[in-house]
Image (spheres, rainbow, N blue to C red):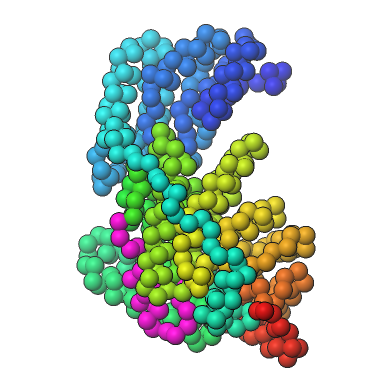
Amino acid sequence: MIALPVAGIGLDFVHDDGENVKHVNIHGFPKDKILVAGIVDGRNVWKSSLVQKATLLHHLASVAEQLIIQPSCSLLHVPVTTKHEHTLPTELAGALSFADEKLDEIRMLTEYMKGNTTIDELIKYDEQTNIYLAKFREQERTNDITAVPLRRTPYNERKKVQQAHLHLPLFPTTTIGSFPQTNEVRQARMKWKKGEWNDNKYKSFIKKEIAKWIKIQEQLQLDVLVHGEFERTDMVEFFGEKLQGMACTTNGWVQSYGSRCVRPPIIFSDISYQQPMTVEETVYAQSLTNKPVKGILTGPVTILNWSFVRDDISRKHALMQLALAIREEVLQLEKEGIRIIQVDEPALREGLPLKKEKHASYWEDAVTAFRLATSSVKEETQIHTHMCYSQFEHMLHIIDELDADVISIESSRSHGELVSAFETYEYQKEIGLGVYDIHSPRVPTKEEISEQIERALRVLRPEQFWVNPDCGLKTRKEKEAIAALKVMVEAAHEYRERLLAYGGMKSWK
Ligand code: GLN
Ligand code: ZN
């Protein structure tokens, strides 16, 4: 690398596990190049300890002739500024540093290294941050998870109980959870947040939407219904607002994909469950229909991976606290008569560390968290999970270990690869391979959907197979969503009849 014809070399001194300092110490740094030191963490939202950074900078300055100070990576992952956050707890607000504030930290470090300011200024800055953080540190508790079940009865046994309880047909049809978040839905939420609408008005609006979509789903003849997630802005933020120990910003937008942005919650302290989060809407939806309504929750791994976690908290610790909180909600839903509960984990793979040697412990924690959240239910309660936009081929054993009764995975974009993975991996539980791409406004044809079903059935047994879209339908227009689901249900029914005529369904032994 040092032979490259460049004036400077940028190294990350934050996420390198000390490797870069080690190498610089061993090999030195070329005299003719600038060391561009990534010093301020570009991936978190916390103030840096400037004294610590200054110590590292002094060391680097002794090795390199010329030094430039910069963030550890592009500032794309963090919100722009804390200036417009007026609703966060004071202690928390005082400990935060978004992009603008990080640049300020870099300016302060640069001034100090140039000799324009003294270390006292950095000490003062750190002391302030510590005053804020100390408040949260006092609260930290340990989790005792030894008494919480991590295992359900064997799948083969509980599946019979579930079948008797749910009476689902062959090739059950369902959706992933959200229905279109129309302008009307978004405006209603805005009016409520601004105080123009009171809680009652907003709640009855949401109920009207739920009722409308329960009717639509019945007309479409879907088998497992959902309430539609109209009350949720985002699948992580919604839970972040309701769990203790997490805070949500008002303007902390970061890019999620393409032109879509989210406001990741901030995990600042012990996470705990306060009160039911999704029960009212789900139970209301269930009261309107005899078909099972599937409760939809976001899983602990996804909440963790799509939030900012305080630096000095162990991620594993936070993950298990999230798992216990989601478990409470699962049990509440079950207690209120919800027979199917889906715990979404679209970010399950996303948090996988780059370094191979860290994979095993990541997977172990992820699987434990999911099972903590879902293994306490009765045999007859069917647990679903959903994942999307990831490479699943090499992780079927992990998916298996989650022990969800049914998994729905995105696959219409890469159907071939995923389906062929099932040729070599014997998967026993039920699975819905998304039969159409929800990101396209185009309504699929019955032939296209049939082709997807056909392909899957080459490697999966019919009694394993669910028919569902790739992901939630929140980004679609109502008309598009309904038209596509109609085609999907027709295709599923055609297969169901065909197979029954064939004398197909001999299983459920
Ligand atoms: N239940 C969520 C939805 O339907 C899942 C979203 C996701 O997988 N990203 O919108
Ligand atoms: Zn999805």
Q: In screen coordinates, is 242 left or right of 463? A: left
Q: Nearer the viewer, residue 333 or 134?
A: 333
Q: Residue 251 magenta-drawn?
A: no
Up-down relation of residue 238 to residue 95 (above or below) = below
| Residue 202 shows up from this direction | yes
Q: Residue furthest bottom?
A: 501
Up-down relation of residue 49 to residue 351 (above or below) = above
Residue 239, percent from left and from top:
38, 56
Residue 349, percent from left and from top:
59, 50
Q: Residue 292 magenta-drawn?
A: yes
**Residue shown at 29% from the left, 32% from the top:** 134
**Residue segment shown in magenta:** 274-294
Q: Nearer the viewer, residue 218 or 152?
A: 152
**Residue shown at 33% from the left, 46% from the top:** 245
Please tell me in which quadrant of the rendered image residue 459 appears.
Answer: bottom right
Q: Nearer the viewer, residue 329 or 206?
A: 329
**Residue shown at 27% from the left, 60% from the top:** 193
Residue 113, percent from left and from top:
42, 13
Q: In screen coordinates, is 32 left or right of 347? A: right
Up-down relation of residue 260 to residue 100 (above or below) = below
Please tell me in which quadrant of the rendered image residue 170 appears.
Answer: bottom right
Q: In screen coordinates, is 200 left or right of 317? A: left
